Image (spheres, rainbow, N blue to C red):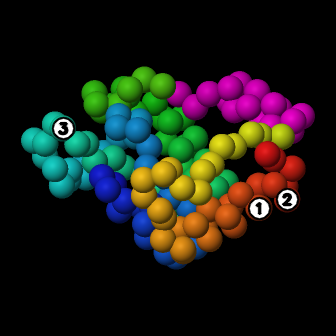
Amino acid sequence: TDIGGSIRVPAAFNSLYGIRPSHGRLPYGGMTNSMEGQETIHSVVGPIAHSAQDVRLFLQSVLKEEPWKYDSKVIPLPWREAEENAAQAKIAEKSLNFAFYEFDGVVRPHPPITRGVEIVRSTLEKNGHT
């Protein structure tokens, strides 16, 4: 489960993939919610996997079972293959555009953060994105 990074941080530190879905996207399935009764910040269930394809497979598999029929807190939203295919087609035909800034005029990032942003920016650029 994840509220403040309990899926994302371990995944990042172990070269894995993790996703924190929106609240209500996946069922709790009998798991204990560490924040029972807390209605302002919801924890969510999500996978940690070896690849983005594994994360996709996990999400598709869970949503294929229509968990909203068994858990009233899950929103009825199936995997949308048509939208996924349309997005992939758009990406295949043209590059993506990203915006970033190095300094907001108020808080200067620490050098490791600046270096990380530069690595991502240059990698995107090398792959044809601007």
User: Hey, which quadrant is residue 10 in on the image?
Assistant: bottom left
Residue for badge 1:
122
Q: Residue at x 89, y 34 (%)?
A: 93
Residue for badge 2:
126
Amino acid at dot 3? Thr
Magenta segment = 78-94
Q: Which mark is residue 81?
A: none
- Mark 3–mark 2 CB contact (< 8 Å): no
Residue 1 in sight in this render: no
Whether residue 106 is situated above or below residue 28 in the rendered picture: below
Amino acid at dot 2? Lys
The crowd level at tag 1 (other Cα within 10 Å; few <14, some 14-19, many 20+) is: few
Relative side of 121 to 129, left or right: left
Lower position in the chain sequence, tag 3 or tag 2 = 3
- Between 121 and 42, the residue placed more toward the observer is 121
Residue for badge 3:
40
Whether residue 64 is situated above or below residue 130 in the rendered picture: above
Q: Which residue is drawn at 18% across and 38% down?
A: 40
The crowd level at tag 3 (other Cα within 10 Å; few <14, some 14-19, many 20+) is: few
- Between 7 and 82, the residue placed more toward the observer is 7
- Mark 3–mark 1 CB contact (< 8 Å): no
